[in-house]
Amino acid sequence: MIQPTTRTRSFAVSKGIIVHLIKSQAGSLGKALMESVMNGIDAGASRIDITLDRKGYTVQDNGHGFQTVADIERYFKEFGFDHTTGEEAGRRQFGQFGLGRGQQWNWAHTLWRTRTFEMHVDIRASGLDYTLHEGLPDAPGTTITGTFYEAISTQEVLTHVKHLGELVKFSPVPVFVNGHDVTTHPDLVRTWTHTTDEAWIQAKEYGPLRVYNMGMFVVEIPRTAPAAPARSSRSPVRPSR
């Protein structure tokens, strides 16, 4: 007689679903690069340099980078991890699930150079397989080199540079875009209308309300026009003579 058994099993997710997730969450190139800025800050960087042209971009930080293969397996190979666990709590300021880096993969194939490692990601050519090189000369920090799948125009470069500058404007560490510091430390800004430990809010009398989280742009909420006073359906009363 066969004895019944009970086991706990985990659901699996197909690679196609993950590729779809990468593409669907990629809002703009500026936001994709902002994710790299936040990752650099989490890695202890004191400066981040970004270059952007028609063919691609580089993001370079002076943080601690990926120290071991185990780090790469945990934080690079695994697409999505919980930042809120006891082990991760306090180690990072930004993000919750480790999905942000995937936004870049929708725009470009990327080469990641960090410490003694190099990783190459090209989801169009190789899907979710990536190449890992080990034993290279030590290179402090992390440098990401992205080559666009399709070259962009000069006007698009200017638009992306401006947008990125707006997104990281109040970064707690300097961010240089094409050689220019685009940041202002949030403590130097006098126009915040409300601040908390995590958020800075700018609300102007005429214009949208902007919310920044730890210096990074979160959302812009358009100001709605005040409703016009309701008109009475009755005929106006003329003053008596």
Image: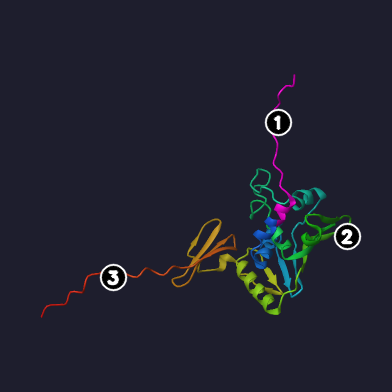
Q: Which class describes the residues within 10 Å of circle 2: few (<14), some (14-19), or many (20+)?
A: few
Residue 35's image quarter?
bottom right
Dot in front, 3 or 2: 3
Q: Residue at x 71, y 65 (%)?
A: 47
Q: Amino acid at mark 2?
A: Pro
Q: Quadrant of the N terminus?
A: top right
Badge 3 marks a residue whose secondary structure is loop
The residue lying furthest to the front in this view is 1
Q: Which class describes the residues within 10 Å of circle 3: few (<14), some (14-19), or many (20+)?
A: few
Badge 1 marks a residue whose secondary structure is loop
How many angstroms separate mark 1 from mark 3 (CA)? 68 Å
Above or below, 76 against 211 in this view is: above
Residue 167's image quarter?
bottom right
Is residue 49 found inside the magenta-colored segment of the image?
no
Q: Percent position (x, y) of residue 60?
A: 75, 65
Residue occupied by mark 3: 231
Residue occupied by mark 1: 7
Badge 2 marks a residue whose secondary structure is loop
Q: Percent position (x, y) of residue 42?
A: 68, 56
The reply to whether residue 7 is in sight is yes
**Residue bounds of the magenta highlight:** 1-19
How many angstroms separate mark 1 from mark 2 (CA)? 47 Å
- Nearest the camera: 148 or 117? 148
Q: Residue at x 66, y 47 (%)?
A: 82
Instruction: Tell me how many marks there are.
Output: 3
Residue occupied by mark 2: 137
Q: Earlier in the sequence, mark 3 or mark 2?
A: 2
Is residue 10 found inside the magenta-colored segment of the image?
yes
Q: Quadrant of the C terminus?
A: bottom left
Residue 177's image quarter?
bottom right
